Image (cartoon, rainbow, N blue to C red):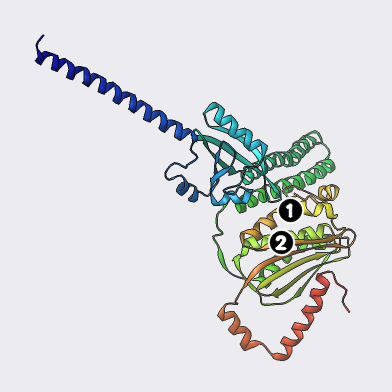
């Protein structure tokens, strides 16, 4: 073998040895980078920017359960960057996600301030030492779903009573076909049950419309005086039958922005409720006053009152403080719920004051608006200082009676 061949062999061996060394160096560098990644708690690029743009609660936690990064809403649940994640349930969820290396989800109850909230929590591993925890508050969704279930169940139950009564009365009429007096008696009861069924159906539809619609469509400047007059007149027959006098007092000329039909029905429901729970010969007062740009419409009765423990529930659908009286009067248990939703749709609120044996006062508060120019002009042309002063003094006395205070 000559010298040239030996040189070529030497170069080939050197190349092979050099390639092997290069491969060994590359493998060593990759292993070192992987080990560094496993030991690192540095956030992947863009993670913090994503968290800052999230509306949900989201935190990145390391293996020591320290919060490395957090979205702004996370602070509401006490999750602050740099602190340790609290809550054994959340810690268990993170450990499960790290052990399986798959996303893990669970529904939990977490405290937001002093309030317990239902949340859907999901943990996902993003690096060997970092885990992303996303929390979605589902309290409102669960509340709405529970309300829907209760509404369906209560509606079915309430409809069964008049439907069953109509069926039985129809059979009774058929069996008493030879007795005109019995037929007339059962026919009268049948008509009453049919009217009750119609009223219940109508109120269910009204309540569903108030809850389902996004916006009120018939908005305009509404005269509170006209609304109260229409509401009181709609309950005139019921008031006469119950021997109740409805007294109108307070300020005049107030206006609000709203749907006149919805507002009229809301006040009519309050007046009907006051009539139903008042003793014969008593008065129901409807008073109005404007305070700091807010119109207050108060409906007061001298009835049995509502115990304090039940006052928070009177606006619930189908809830009745006095079951026996509601059955006698044909109440649906939806009137106050309709009032609450109608007022809320107008951006207002309704409050209750009541004492057992002393009666109840329901007060609707709505934002006042300026009277239309043409109405104001007419009042200005026809009004007289003397009569205006007299009219102003009298409603003040009436309003005191409406609010349940003693008049001098």
The front one of 154 and 291 is: 291
Residue occupying the far top of the picture: 1
Give the image location of residue 213, x and y in percent: 56, 53
Separation (CA) of disc 1 from disc 2: 10 Å
Query: What residue is at 57 percent from the left and 51 percent from the top?
Result: 73
In the structure shown, which secondary structural element does the residue marked by tag 1 occupy? loop
Q: Is residue 390 above or below residue 325?
A: below
The front one of 217 and 192 is: 217
Give the image location of residue 96, x and y in percent: 59, 30
Within 10 Å of disc 2 (Cα), the crowding (few <14, some 14-19, many 20+) is many
Give the image location of residue 118, x and y in percent: 65, 42
N-terminal label among 1 and 2: 1
Query: What residue is at 75 percent from the left and 75 percent from the top?
Result: 250
Query: What residue is at 25 percent from the left and 23 percent from the top?
Result: 18
Q: Is residue 330 above or below residue 234?
A: above
The front one of 94 and 218 is: 94
For mark 2, what is the residue?
350
Give the image location of residue 39, x and y in percent: 49, 35
Image side of residue 131 versus residue 143, left or right: left
For mark 1, what is the residue?
315
Q: Are marks 1 and 2 in contact (CB under 8 Å)?
A: yes
Q: Quadrant of the C terminus?
A: bottom right
* Quadrant in which residue 63 is drawn: top right
In the structure shown, which secondary structural element does the residue marked by tag 2 occupy? strand
* Residue 169 visible in rendering: yes
Residue occupying the far right of the picture: 357
């Amino acid at each position: 073998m000559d010298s040239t061949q030996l040189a070529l062999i030497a170069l080939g061996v050197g190349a092979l040895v050099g390639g092997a060394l290069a491969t060994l160096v590359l493998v060593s560098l990759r292993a070192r980078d992987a080990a560094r990644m496993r030991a690192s708690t540095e956030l992947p690029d863009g993670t913090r920017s994503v968290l800052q743009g999230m509306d949900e609660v989201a935190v990145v936690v390391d293996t020591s359960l320290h919060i490395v990064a957090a979205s702004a809403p996370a602070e509401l649940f006490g999750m602050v960057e740099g602190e340790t994640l609290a809550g054994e349930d959340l810690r268990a969820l993170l450990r499960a996600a790290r052990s399986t290396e798959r996303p893990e989800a669970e529904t939990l109850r977490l405290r937001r301030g002093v309030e317990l909230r239902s949340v859907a929590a999901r943990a996902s591993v993003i690096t060997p030492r970092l885990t992303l925890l996303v929390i979605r508050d589902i309290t409102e969704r669960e509340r709405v779903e529970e309300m829907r279930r209760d509404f369906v169940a209560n509606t079915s139950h309430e409809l069964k009573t008049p439907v069953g009564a109509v069926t039985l009365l129809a059979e009774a009429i058929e069996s008493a076909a030879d007795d005109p007096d019995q037929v007339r008696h059962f026919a009268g009861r049948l008509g009453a049950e049919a009217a009750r069924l119609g009223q219940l159906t109508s109120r269910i539809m009204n309540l569903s419309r108030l809850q389902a619609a996004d916006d009120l469509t018939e908005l305009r400047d509404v005269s509170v005086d006209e609304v109260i007059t229409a509401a009181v007149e709609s309950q005139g027959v019921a008031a006469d039958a119950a021997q109740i006098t409805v007294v109108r007092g307070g300020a005049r000329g107030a206006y609000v922005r709203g749907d006149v039909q919805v507002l009229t029905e809301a006040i009519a429901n309050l007046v009907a409720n006051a009539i139903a729970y008042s003793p014969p010969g008593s008065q129901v007062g409807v008073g109005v006053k404007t305070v700091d740009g807010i119109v207050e419409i108060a409906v007061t009765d001298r009835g049995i009152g509502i115990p304090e423990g039940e006052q928070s529930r009177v606006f619930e659908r189908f809830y009745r403080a006095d079951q026996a009286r509601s059955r006698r009067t044909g109440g649906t248990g939806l009137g106050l719920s309709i009032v609450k939703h109608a007022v809320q749709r107008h951006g207002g609120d309704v409050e209750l004051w009541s004492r057992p044996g002393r009666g109840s006062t329901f007060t609707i508060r709505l934002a006042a608006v300026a009277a239309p120019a043409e109405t104001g002009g007419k009042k200005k042309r026809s009004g007289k200082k003397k009569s205006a002063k007299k009219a102003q003094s009298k409603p003040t006395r009436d309003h005191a009676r409406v609010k349940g205070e003693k008049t001098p």
